[in-house]
Every structure is written in structure tokens, then in C-alpha cells.
Amino acid sequence: MMRGGNGNMQNMMKQMQKMQKKMAEAQEKLGEEKIEGTAGGGMVTVVVTGHKEVVDVRINPEAVDPDDVEMLQDLVLAATNDALKKADDLTNNTMGQFTKGMNLPF
């Protein structure tokens, strides 16, 4: 039988609780981050939070061509996808620090 096993378990539980708190704080901070995605050389800009909520869409008036609405739609779509990818990258970089070195199945 191992001696001190209970103390090690309590210590590990405290460490896990600290890590959970830090993860929750990091997750909250992500929600406050603003990430911009652009398309068409900046003709369309979409801003999302770290929680992938679209909070702003800016369209340069020069991008508005009544005869080519499809191009504008494509630019909005591309800018949105760009912003969401950047948000994913930020989330992975931020939250990845908590799982570094752990062999967790996903």
C-alpha cells in the first residue's frame, strides 16, 4: 500500500481546480477579444469575438456594385471565414497552453 497517496491526490485536485479557474478566465478573456477578417484587399471587414460572435461588418462603398451583388456576397463570406479562422487559431493558441503535455483524446 502506498503511503501519502491521499495527500498526493488532494494536491492533484487542488492543481486541477487552479487550472480550471485559469481556463475559465482565459475563456472569458477570449470573449472580449476582437478579431478582424478581411477580403478584397480590405473592401470588406468582418469583426468577431473570440467566442465566434460577429460584432461588426464594414463594407467599403466602392465594393457595392448593383450589377454584381454576387461579388459582394462572396467578399462578405470570405471575410467572415477569415475572421472565424483567426478566432479558431486564437482559441487554440490560448486554450492549448492548458493541455500542452497532456495526452488527451479528442
Image (spheres, grey):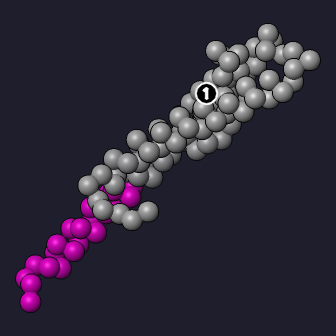
Amino acid found under the numbered disc labelled 1: Gly
- Residue that sits furthest to the top in the current view: 62
Residue 12 horizontal side relative to residue 98, left or right: left
In the image, taking residue 81 as reference, residue 104 lies left or right, namely left
Rendered view: 81 above or below 21: above
Span colored in magenta: 1-21
Q: Nearer the viewer, residue 94 or 40?
A: 40
Residue 20 part of the magenta segment: yes
Task: Point out residue 17 in the picture as x, y percentages from the top left corner.
Answer: 34, 62
Q: Answer with the quarter of the image where residue 60 lies.
A: top right
Task: Give above or below for 61 relative to 104.
Answer: above
State the image quarter where residue 81 is shown.
top right
Element type at mark 1 = strand
**Residue 40 x/y as whole percent:** 68, 18
Give coordinates of residue 24: x percent, y percent.
45, 52
Q: Residues within 10 Å of mark 1 (few under 14, many from 20)?
A: many
**Residue 92, percent from left and from top:** 44, 45
Which residue occupies 17% across, 72% down? 8
Task: Name the residue that disc number 1 marks.
Answer: 37
Q: Measuring 14% from the left and 79% from the top, which residue is drawn there?
A: 5
- Answer whether residue 29 is visible to the viewer in this image: no
On the question of residue 52 being in view, the answer is: yes
The quadrant of the image that shows the N terminus is bottom left
Which residue is pictured at 70% across the width and 16% down the height? 43
